[in-house]
Image: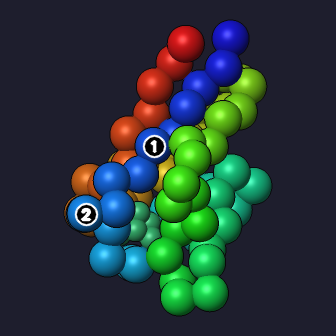
Amino acid sequence: MTIRILVDFDLCTGHGRCYNTSPDLLTEDEEGFVSTRWEPTTAADDRLGEAERAAAACPERAIRVEQD
Ligand code: F3S
């Protein structure tokens, strides 16, 4: 099983809390936005808690986590 982390770039304003909360899953681009602009980030489902913390940390609610 895997998880997918999806970012709504219409909502992301570059707060940076997601990649600071879960730096092993998410990183920043050169402008400070989360660097998953074109594709969802995938990970093993044992990282679900970490992904959900990243999503919860975003004040814009720009991150969604899905499980396959
Ligand atoms: Fe963007 Fe939210 Fe992260 S605004 S940089 S997705 S904390």
Label 2: state its secondary structure. loop
The answer to whether residue 22 is left or right of residue 63 is right
Mark 1 to mark 2 CA distance (whole Å)? 12 Å
| Residue receiving disc 1 | 6
Residue drawn 55% across the image and 13% down it: 68
Callouts 1 and 2 close, C-beta under 8 Å: no
- 34 to 38, vertically: above or below: below
Label 1: state its secondary structure. strand
The answer to whether residue 46 is left or right of residue 33 is right
Picture disc at residue 61: none
Task: Give the residue type at disc 2.
Answer: Asp
> Where does the image place residue 11, in percent across and percent down from the top left?
25, 63
Residue 19 seen by the camera: no
Q: Quadrant of residue 28?
A: bottom right
Task: Give the residue type at disc 1.
Answer: Leu
Mark 1 neighbour density, 10 Å: few (under 14) some (14–19) many (20 or more): some
> Where does the image place residue 37, in percent across and percent down from the top left?
51, 60
> Where does the image place residue 40, in percent across and percent down from the top left?
55, 42
Picture disc at residue 10: 2
Q: Furthest-bottom residue in view?
A: 31
Q: Quadrant of residue 23?
A: bottom right
Q: Quadrant of residue 35?
A: bottom right
